Image (cartoon, grey):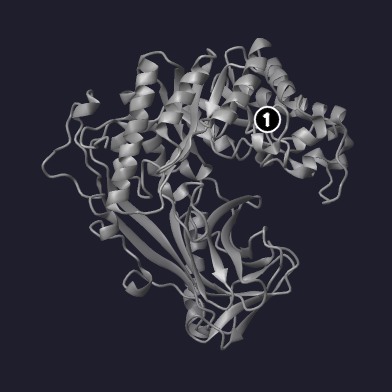
Amino acid sequence: MNKRTYRICCFVLMIILTSMVLGGCKILFPQEEEFIELTNPNSSDNKGNNKKDKNKGAQDDQDDIDESSMHMGTVEVIQEVIYVEDFEGETTEFTRRGDSNIEIVKNISNSGKNSLYISGRAEAWNGAKLDLTEVLLDEQKYIINAWVLYEEGPDTIQVNCKIERNGDDYLDVASNVVNKGEWTKLKGSAIIPENTDTAIIYFETDETEKEIIDFYIDKVIISHESVNADRGNIPSLKEVYNDLFTMGVAVAASDITGERKELIKQQFNSLTPANELKPENILDYEKCISDSKYDDSPAVKFDKIEPILEFAKEAEIPVRGHTLIWHDQTPRWFFTEGYSKDKDAPLVSKKLMLKRMKNYIKQVLEYTQTNYPGLIYCWDVVNEVVNPGDMEENGLRTKGSLWYKVIGPSYIEKAFEYAREYADPDVKLFLNDYDTEERGKARYIANLVSSLQEKGLIDGIGLQTHLGIEIPSLVDVDRSIKEYGKLGLEIHITELDMDLTEHTEEELFRQARRYKRLFSFLKTIQEEKAANITNITFWGLTDDSSWLNKPGKSSYPLLFDEYLLQKPAFWGVVLNPDIPLV
């Protein structure tokens, strides 16, 4: 028995003994069905989604995508409750997080008699936490349910449940909008990444809330989920489009686990880190403020991106670097004197900020190219820099961009200059933006790209292509790609998804038809050489991990569901004849 197994056994025994003595937290086993929610593959929500087509067996030869048998796979889901806290005992294993007070209170509860009251909070992140390091195992998926209530304050607030991992990594689990005076359920899931040393579940209000309010939590239930899924014999996206463009997927560290790794390797030949290469995850604040030598050359760290790069290296999947310069997910302190976090801290001079930018880009490129030579084949140098609504002369984003505020419009060209200086010769440099099919915005993007192109600073344009189920028009998408194609640069579809909020058979097939129309356009564009599309990347692997999921509102925008089963959308992308175009 290894050390961790021994600790887990001791922890389980401790909880059982505690429940016998105090009647508080306790382990529940699968037979207690009131806490187990099994997915029924034949439920109305999944109708036609998890059954194999008995009239069409999976074919051995998938070379011709138009003859592939369309099926949705099968799944068996088992949830085993491993932890429950109902606060009915005299004590709890929950402790306070930050400046807050916690206490078990009587006669206020969602069920039973008691709940946990969190008060005296100074900041939004203050709340209640539970250390489950010895219970939550690496590469396993857990479902967390809890109930929350608040009685004083605004009409609604957002309450979050998260997992603090290894002290400085935060996994989103569940969020919901709570009405004042109403018990509201939080339900979500998380996959524990590999090499997790500590895992602490905690509850907080969202940082966007203007008031710091007291709240209650009750009936916290944690279940381990195991899945037996059979996708059947499905074609590989990267093989289907091998002669046209590479097929990519954006991933988080939690995607680098078990079956998810195998699905990625089977389907994709390009990888984009969704967040781990953004400045907020690379900059090392504690080291930056430790010595004045970092004032013009910020300290950086790469612990969060390494699991993804190691996997990509092992799997021999090339990586899109995303992103070096962005107005969002770049902390304000990066722009302040002395790296101060004070909300009123003065910003540095243009001269100093250019030094910080240059040295940041230099360090990121040198680290990745030294430790993972040849792995990152392109970079989104700047991201989302065009926003005509800000009324800047050249259509550039001004509002909310500290890059623009400190340096001015020249920061874009300088970023490309620095990237070109330090990037390996074969690494391509891209400008990446959204709503690129809008005619007005497209003109500004084309003008900016042309100016960079004249100076030999840019190799391609990244079109995010976040679609809705109805808008934008795919005719506009098709037209805009052809217009960008006239510039003679590479085109990447960098963040493709299709927002869908109704999980019904009818809507899932509607989404599949729209995906099929889109890929019919893309295939024709490439075959007719109307533009040089070299990569298409989906912004996420599975629906449940999509950025489009909002508190209390789910989206189903991708090709695989939460159990890694292919959806009708997958068959639309491979142009299966069973998916009609109209």
Residue 4 placement (x, y as % from top left)? 51, 56
Q: In this view, does 566 lie to the left or right of 127?
A: left
Q: Is residue 387 left or right of residue 574?
A: right
535 or 449: which is nearer to us?
449
232 or 493: which is nearer to us?
493
Residue lying at 69% horizontally and 35% vertically, measured from the top left = 397
Which residue carries the number 1 mark? 395
Residue lying at 41% horizontally and 21% vertically, measured from the top left = 245
Residue 465 placement (x, y as % from top left)? 48, 34
279 or 581: which is nearer to us?
581
Name the outermost residue toward the bottom: 107
Q: Is residue 318 visible?
A: no
Residue 194 lies, with reference to residue 360, above or below; the image says below
282 or 89: which is nearer to us?
282
Q: For the residue marked with disc 1, what is the amino acid? A: Gly
Residue 237 placement (x, y as % from top left)? 34, 29
Q: In this view, does 138 lie to the left or right of 157?
A: left
- Classify the position of the C terminus by image quarter: top left
Residue 159 placement (x, y as % from top left)? 59, 65
